[in-house]
Amino acid sequence: MLETSFRTNTCGELSNKNVNNKVKLCGFVHTRRDHGGVIFVDLRDRYGLTQIVFNPDKKEIFKEADKLRREDVIQIEGTVKARPKGMENPSLATGSIEVFVDKLNILNKVETPPLEIEDRVEVNEDIRLKYRYLDLRRSKMQKNLLTRHKLIKVIRNYFDSLNFIDVETPILTKSTPEGARDYLVPSRVNPGKFYALPQSPQLFKQILMVAGYDRYYQIARCFRDEDLRADRQPEFTQLDIEMSFIDEEDIYKTMEGLFKKIFKEILNKDIKTPFRRMPYQEAMDKYGIDKPDLRFGLELVDVTDLAKKSSFNVFKNAELVKCLKVKANFSRTEIEDLTKFVTTYGAKGLAYVKIGEKFEGNLSKFFNEKVQKEIIKKVNASKGDILFFVADNKKITNAAMAGLRLEIGKRLKLMKDEFNFVWITDFPLLEFSEEENRLVSVHHPFTSPKGEDMALLSKSPEKVKAKAYDLVLNGTEVGGGSIRIHNPKLQEEVFKVLGISKEDAKKRFGFLLDALKFAVPHGGIAFGIDRLAAVLTGSDSIREVIAFPKNKEAKCFMTSAPSDIDDKQLKELHLKLDFVKK
């Protein structure tokens, strides 16, 4: 009961226990029906629906009720009655009762809503985002936000029980370019200077470890200026965690306990721990991606050496050739469709053969019988299988085959209805960026190399593995982290390999480098709250679990942000829009 001066009850709590009670309810008119001179209204608030009844005997009230339309905001007083036998609605929590109205107060007579407040009606997303205050009234959106609320509550309770401390870190901070673009905020009181909005609390949580707060967590707002898609937003929410005097095993154990609790309390699902672990290289070899969906098989096989024995130039000249074996009878049209699909990943095409006694199809002429048998044996193919091949550089081949595997898995409905977790481990510490023409960090420059690989850092840095880990759920990376570098000399060596000079390192990260002189061993992890909430609610896009998201162009249709600012504000910030074309 949420009694206020306006209401005694919500629209989701009345039952047979309340029969003959006098009640006051408030809410939105969900539906209105006129049955034989009696008006029935489903009154809705975020707690549910209650059927209210207007009897023609009360002429003035009945006359007003006849004018009610969808989404009008009303308050009623009345008496709870049991519904006639056979007229109950078992699908409603309040389906055994109805309220006969004695008083009606129309609090707001509204215009015709620009969208239906109804889950079954499909509405254009731009319209939904423009009128988000109405879209959020839909029961699906309310359930999504309630699930998100419960998720945050479970997280806080769990970490509180383990002596973690919740510490807020700055939103206005220093720009430390190494990764995505920063959102910058000009300083009025420091002309020509800028703050940056944090991409994560990474540096501050490491400093908290230096400060002796050995168990930290935060539900943190983060900001990245990057190209958007369904699972990205310019501002997003992250669960940030850092611990002192730990190693990878401590992270795994603590986080598995968290997810076990989340899934039990929110979905009433018992998930098995410990989670499976898979080295990064195994994930790339078998699935072409470092966030594999393990709810189905269809593993990829590297057939580069065998493919080069063919007379097919595309195979002979490729850096990597991978094969996907599928037990299916695809038509020519379906294969053409799959061929178009892989080209979206940059692949030049999709080669295939069907397996009979040997290869069948146009590709077979490029392989002698011996090589055909060797490929059939290597991929463990049998009669009726179809083999798909992509040949290109490593990046394109892996991306195209990873996408193809998922697409075929969806088309053949191979994904099991389960939650399949896997830790991806042993990431490379560094990777070569063609764009920057240098080695860059796979995670971030504060990630610790594995102890056994320290000697390779100066000789073969590309071979160094990191103490880094990602948690993947059903093909979605829900979080990632690492054990951090706590030795200032090692940090300097990593910066050197990354091509960051001492002067530049001091300029970007000086306060952290100074703090590391007093550091303790520490490590942590961060999880995307938006992504996790999307998984828990079965949503395809994180926009479905964020109250006020931006669209794919980083715009808010409701508030018209980003927007122009006037000349006075520009002058106060010491800015001129010299380079912006109108």
Image (tube, helix red, strand yellow):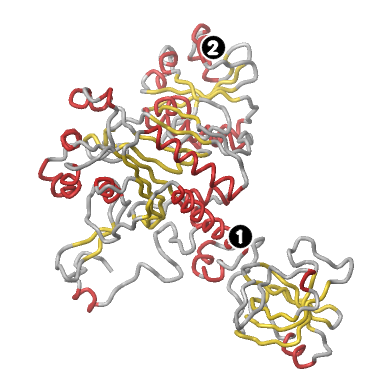
In depth, the one of 181 and 161 nearer the eye is 161
In depth, the one of 297 and 581 nearer the eye is 297
Residue appearing at x 45%, y 20% in the figure = 302
For label 2, the residue is: 377
For the C terminus, the image quarter is bottom left
Q: Mark 1 or 2, which is nearer the eye?
A: 1
Amino acid at pointer 1: Lys
Q: Earlier in the sequence, mark 1 or mark 2?
A: 1
Classify 101 as above or below 286. Answer: below
Amino acid at pointer 2: Lys
For the N terminus, the image quarter is bottom right
User: Would you identify the image quadrant in which residue 489 lies?
Assistant: top left
Classify 24 as above or below 551. Answer: below
For label 1, the residue is: 140
As drawn, the residue found furthest toward the left would be 503
Classify 132 as above or below 421. Answer: below
Dot 2 alpha-carbon crowd within 10 angstroms: few under 14, some 14 to 19, many 20 or more? few
Residue appearing at x 22%, y 79% in the figure = 568
In depth, the one of 54 and 349 nearer the eye is 54
Dot 2: element? helix
Dot 1: element? helix
As drawn, the residue found furthest toward the bottom would be 60
